[in-house]
Image: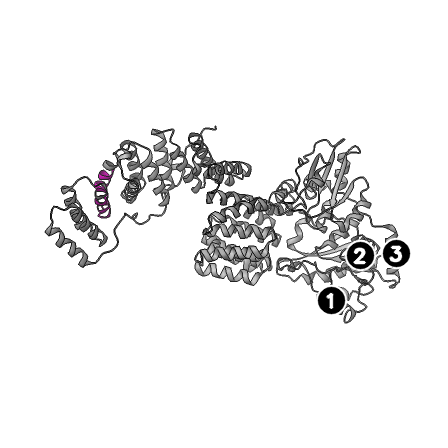
């Protein structure tokens, strides 16, 4: 094993802002009449040590420590055996400020053999010793720890003292206590285990992992050390190592709540939600009163699309811990993911009523504003979150997302990197960072981070695979499967790299590509060198052998850019990479010519998926008026999933300006026919939808309107390297998206007017 670099006290902050004197065990408050009753009893039985001790306890509880000291000493003169009486005397001396006397008394007790101390007495001694040392500052703590090391016969009290110092916010002193224990007892597994926990809490996961590993080697039964090892490896982004540690912990106790919860949370973070659910269900069945398990169950269920159960689980966690703002935040997150925004805001209001400075609640509230494209409001809330807890990494992560939305990729990158310094970057955060890197034109690092989306299950393949991932091995005589990923538009976007894969694989390779059934004919026609298969949604519980059976390697479709688009020079200069059916193109050209001699421009204005977080990228039909007023242009609707009011508008106020061909073509599902229609058009105007990617894939002249949020695909340039014939029109922050339409109209007049 790598040698443990044991931190010294100077390497971990010793002093925090001075705290009040540590609490010393005391009795419940008593009345003056009770004290007088005890005094009377003592006068009647002056040799009763128990009565003297009871009187001393009452005086201590009444903050009459000087009198309590005298009574404890009198009790000990009668009977010197009770160790708890000596400890109480030491507590009174600490409170009286006579810490040297208290320490000497406590060190004498600490020198006794461990088996001579009553159960739980070591905890009392450790707490009192720390209370005696703290007012003297760092030097007193170090001196006292060294005295305890010399005087005690086991590492036990030093370990207990380390635990207390850590609780009092003195990680440096806690580390020193463990180091002193290990100097004298180098094979103490408990000391290594405690050191691991302290280092982990102090933000030193590398040394925490070494200490935990050593504790495990010395004592294979230490569940606490295995958990610390798992947490340290998570903090180091060593997810495979963390999983191995948790699997070993489960061999020790398959029903431990923390083990099950930690393992389930790890799997959830890695996007392995079906596995995470199995573990969290077991944990909940065995520990039904633990609110945090219901919270995690809710988050996993919503990822699996079981929305009703997710909300119920979140509400159950809140019922169990109504005063815990974290429970309300978790329920809000579930509600946000299913676009129940007002309910989510109510839960965040509940959390902030409990704790107005709760950084997670503020961070989630900022996310609501980001989803609504209320970026200034989000910025203000994130400032509050950072002021409340400057070390909360998720607030910095959300700030990075906000800066990405503004197109300020340099600031976004800085925020993501700060989040990484404060805590382990999750796969999802690394994936978010990819957009900042790509927006700055840092293609190699950007695509490498983009690959983390697979691990975070943000970029979700339509099925799992057991075949080895292809990493560039020779494919001659081999079969490679390319797994469908995300939606139709994303698949078309990624397919721009398929010619590069075909060229690298060579004629002797066999490639099978899965795509959405809607675009299968289009892709099959365009790439006759590969086998094109219809993709079918398959979750983690379904069999995958049908796809895997004849494969040697597999990879996800969205992983192609990481291999073939690592520099701008590797983007093709020619427009278009898919081909519509020529006969159907001829049909649609004839059909469009029948509408008159004017140029024909297809127009789309929104997606069918109208979630709150997506609405800022789309327009309402009535907002298209400045574009539809372009003279000498005939507009043709490419909008799929038309609403009834939109149909009515095209037959009423917009009649003649915007033609609907809905009766002749299924714009939602028959995308091969849509490709033919779009090829026959003179140009296309669209937001960031499937229509945009279809236009780019076909090589159509296209004008794409978007907010800065979608500008990362320019890859640090002022154009679209993916689609040479597509021009982007970007609405700056705070500017309505409709403001992009006048310049698009000018571009249409420029380009179509010249032929």
Residue at the image position 88 percent from the left and 60 percent from the top: 593
Q: Which of marks 3 and 2 precedes in the sequence? A: 3
Residue at label 1? 646
Q: Is residue 223 left or right of residue 585?
A: left
In the image, residue 218 sits, relative to residue 346, either above or below, namely above
Q: Quadrant of the C terminus?
A: bottom right
Q: Which residue is mark 2?
A: 683
Q: Is residue 593 visible?
A: yes
Magenta stretch, overall SS: helix
Give how far across and how far down residue 224 sits, in percent. Answer: 43, 39
The label on residue 587 is 3
Give me the C-alpha separation between circle 2 and circle 1: 22 Å
Residues in magenta, as a range: 86-106
Q: Label for residue 608?
A: none
The 10 Å Cα crowd at callout 2, few under 14, some 14 to 19, many 20 or more, is: many
Residue 518 located left or right of residue 450: right
Between 355 and 630, which is closer to the camera in this rendering?
A: 355
Tell me how far mark 3 sits from mark 1, CA to CA. Answer: 26 Å
Along the horizontal axis of the image, is 553 left or right of 34?
A: right
Front: mark 2 or 3: 3
> How far across and down, in percent of the image, does residue 686 sit?
73, 57
Count residues near mark 3 (Cα–Cα under 10 Å), then give few for <14, some for 14-19, many for 20+. Answer: some
């Amino acid at each position: 094993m790598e040698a443990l670099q044991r931190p010294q006290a100077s390497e971990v902050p010793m002093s925090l802002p001075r705290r009040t004197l540590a609490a010393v065990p005391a009795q419940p408050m008593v009345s003056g009449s009770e004290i007088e009753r005890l005094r009377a009893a003592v006068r009647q039985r002056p040799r009763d040590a128990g009565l003297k001790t009871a009187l001393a306890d009452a005086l201590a509880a009444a903050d009459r420590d000087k009198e309590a000291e005298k009574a404890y000493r009198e009790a000990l003169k009668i009977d010197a055996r009770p160790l708890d009486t000596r400890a109480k005397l030491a507590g009174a001396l600490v409170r009286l400020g006579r810490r040297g006397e208290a320490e000497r008394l406590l060190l004498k007790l600490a020198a006794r053999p461990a088996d001579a101390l009553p159960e739980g007495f070591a905890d009392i001694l450790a707490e009192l010793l720390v209370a005696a040392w703290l007012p003297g500052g760092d030097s007193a703590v170090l001196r006292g720890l060294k005295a305890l090391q010399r005087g005690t016969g086991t590492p036990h009290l030093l370990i207990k003292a380390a635990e207390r110092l850590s609780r009092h916010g003195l990680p440096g002193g806690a580390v020193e206590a463990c180091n002193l224990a290990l100097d004298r007892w180098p094979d103490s597994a408990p000391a290594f285990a405690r050191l691991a926990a302290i280092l982990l809490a102090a933000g030193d996961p590398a040394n925490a992992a070494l200490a935990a590993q050593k504790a495990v080697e010395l004592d294979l039964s230490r569940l606490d050390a295995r958990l610390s090892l798992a947490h340290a490896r998570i903090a180091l982004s060593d997810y495979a190592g963390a999983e191995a540690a948790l699997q070993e912990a489960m061999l020790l106790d398959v029903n431990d709540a923390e083990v099950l919860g930690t393992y389930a949370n790890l799997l959830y973070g890695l996007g392995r939600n079906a596995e995470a659910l199995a573990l969290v269900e077991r944990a909940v069945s065995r520990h039904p009163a633990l609110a945090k398990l219901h919270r995690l169950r809710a988050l996993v269920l919503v990822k699996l699309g079981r929305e009703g159960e997710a909300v119920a689980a979140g509400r159950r966690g809140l019922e169990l811990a109504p005063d815990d703002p974290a429970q309300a935040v978790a329920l809000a997150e579930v509600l946000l993911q299913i676009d129940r925004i007002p309910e989510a805001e109510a839960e965040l209001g509940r959390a902030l009523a409990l704790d107005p400075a709760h950084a997670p609640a503020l961070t989630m509230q900022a996310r609501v504003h980001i989803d609504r494209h209320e970026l200034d409001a989000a910025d203000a809330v994130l400032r509050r979150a950072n002021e409340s807890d400057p070390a909360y990494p998720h607030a910095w992560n959300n700030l990075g997302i906000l800066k990405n939305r503004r197109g300020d990729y340099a600031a976004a990158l800085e925020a993501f990197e700060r989040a990484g310094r404060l805590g382990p970057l999750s796969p999802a955060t690394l994936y978010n960072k990819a957009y900042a890197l790509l927006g700055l034109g840092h293609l190699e690092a950007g695509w490498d981070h983009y690959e983390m989306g697979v691990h975070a299950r943000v970029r979700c393949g339509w099925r799992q695979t057991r075949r080895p991932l292809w990493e560039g091995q020779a494919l001659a005589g081999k079969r490679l499967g390319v797994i469908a990923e995300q939606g139709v538009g994303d698949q078309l976007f990624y397919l721009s790299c398929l010619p590069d894969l075909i060229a690298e694989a060579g004629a002797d390779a066999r490639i099978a590509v899965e795509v959405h059934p809607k675009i299968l004919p289009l892709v099959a026609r365009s790439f006759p060198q590969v086998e094109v298969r219809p993709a079918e949604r398959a979750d983690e519980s379904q069999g995958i052998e049908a796809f895997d059976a004849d494969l040697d390697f597999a990879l996800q479709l969205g992983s192609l850019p990481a291999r073939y688009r690592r520099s701008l020079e590797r983007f093709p200069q020619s427009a278009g990479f898919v081909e519509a059916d020529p006969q159907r193109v001829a049909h649609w050209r004839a059909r469009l010519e029948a509408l008159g001699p004017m140029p024909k421009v297809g127009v789309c204005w929104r997606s069918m998926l109208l979630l709150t977080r997506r609405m800022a990228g789309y327009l309402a039909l009535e907002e298209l008026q400045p574009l539809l007023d372009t003279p000498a242009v005939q507009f043709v609707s490419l909008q799929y999933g038309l609403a009834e009011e939109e149909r009515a508008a095209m037959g009423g106020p917009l009649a003649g300006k915007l033609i609907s061909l809905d009766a002749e073509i299924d714009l939602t599902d028959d995308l091969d026919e849509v490709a033919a229609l779009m090829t026959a058009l003179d140009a296309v105007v669209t937001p960031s939808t499937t229509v945009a990617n279809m236009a780019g894939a076909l090589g159509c002249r296209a004008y794409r309107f978007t907010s800065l949020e979608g500008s990362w695909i320019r890859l640090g340039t002022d154009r679209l390297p993916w689609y040479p014939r597509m021009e982007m029109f970007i609405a700056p922050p705070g500017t309505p998206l409709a403001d992009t339409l006048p310049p698009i109209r000018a571009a249409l007049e420029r380009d179509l007017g010249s032929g």
